[in-house]
Amino acid sequence: MGDTEFVKTLDSETGTRLRLRVTTASGRVVFFVVQLEILVDSEWRVVVRYDNSHGFTHRDEFDARGRETKKEIRLPDCAAAVQYAEQDLIDRW
């Protein structure tokens, strides 16, 4: 198993970034998290997160109070989900 995690700054002035975490086994993505984070009062907060925990690929949206809304996302595999999630968050942040 291989784990990779990195952060991409989208806008340093507004404190907006992407965090990506991917776990692979035998060259295939088996677990992932792609999330949009914003800096609020010197603390990073998750706004939107795509992942495949709970046994399915989904998108979590968090409001200002931290309440979450979960929506299932149907994609062919985890690698496609990582690409979709990253591009979606970059396009819409």
Image (cartoon, rainbow, N blue to C red):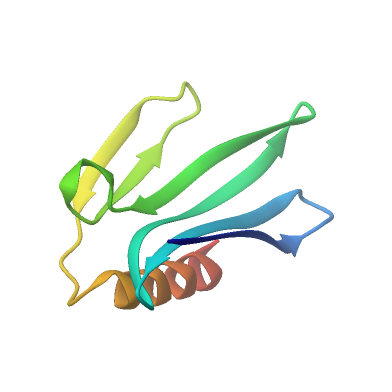
Q: Residue at x 47, y 21 (%)?
A: 65
State the image coordinates of residue 7 (x, y, percent, origin top left). Answer: 67, 58
Residue drawn at 15 percent across, 67 percent down: 74
Report whether 34 appears left or right of 74.
Answer: right
Residue 2 vs 53, above or below: the answer is below
State how many labels appear. 0
Front in this rendered view, residue 1 or 33: 1
Q: Residue at x 53, y 39 (%)?
A: 46
- Above-or-below relation of 59 to 45: below
Q: Residue furthest right?
A: 13
Percent across and percent down for residue 89 are 49, 64
x%, y% of residue 73? 20, 61
Residue drawn at x 77%, y 50% as measured from the top left: 14
Quadrant location of the C terminus? bottom right
* Res. 80 image quadrant: bottom left
- Residue 25 lies, in percent from the top left, at 36, 67
Q: Is residue 67 above or below residue 78?
A: above
Relative to 91, is 22 above or below? above
Q: Is residue 85 left or right of residue 73?
A: right
Question: The N terminus appears in which quarter of the rendering?
Answer: bottom left
Lateral position of residue 47 relative to residue 72, left or right:
right
Q: Closest to the observer: 35 or 3?
A: 3
